[in-house]
Image (cartoon, rainbow, N blue to C red):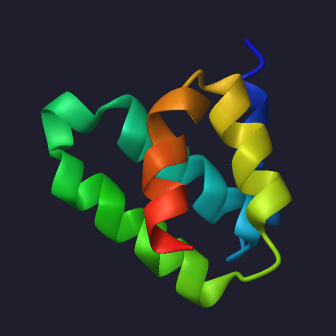
Amino acid sequence: MARLSLYPKCRDLCITPRLFAKTVADCFRYRNKVGIDVAVEALRDFSRRHRGGATELARCARICRVSRVMQPYLDAIA
């Protein structure tokens, strides 16, 4: 249930680091369906656009239970 609370309401739907962080975490969560290359590209795009959003990305990754999967890719990009 906590995963659903990360999505903003329709009236709050603007381009925010929170929405992008959730999208990146979802890409890693469904990496077998969308492909690992899509997930890594989403992570690269997030790191280019939102430099200060690392804490939000870590929070979303922890909630979606992909922080251990995402960690090697974060280390490689940084």
In which quadrant of the rendered image does the N terminus lie? top right
Write the residue at 54% across / 44% down: 71
Q: Residue furthest top?
A: 1
> Looking at the image, which is closer to me, 15 or 37?
37
Left/right of residue 55 with respect to residue 33 in the rendered view? right
The percent coordinates of residue 23 (x first, y second) are 51, 52
Looking at the rendering, which quadrant does residue 19 occupy? bottom right
Write the residue at 45% across / 32% down: 69
Residue 13 in sight here: no
Q: Residue furthest bottom?
A: 49
Write the residue at 16% across / 32% down: 33
Residue 55 in sight here: yes
Looking at the rendering, which quadrant does residue 46 occupy? bottom right
Left/right of residue 8 with respect to residue 28 in the rendered view? right
> Looking at the image, which is closer to me, 59 or 72?
72
Q: Is residue 41 above or below residue 61?
A: below
The percent coordinates of residue 2 (x first, y second) are 78, 19
In which quadrant of the rendered image does the C terminus lie? bottom right
The percent coordinates of residue 42 (x first, y second) are 39, 66
Q: Is residue 12 above or below residue 46?
A: above
The percent coordinates of residue 14 (x first, y second) are 72, 74
> Looking at the image, which is closer to me, 74 or 12?
74
Q: Is residue 15 above or below residue 20?
A: below
Q: Is residue 51 above or below residue 43?
A: below
The number of numbered badges drawn on the structure is 0
Write the residue at 77% across / 49% down: 9
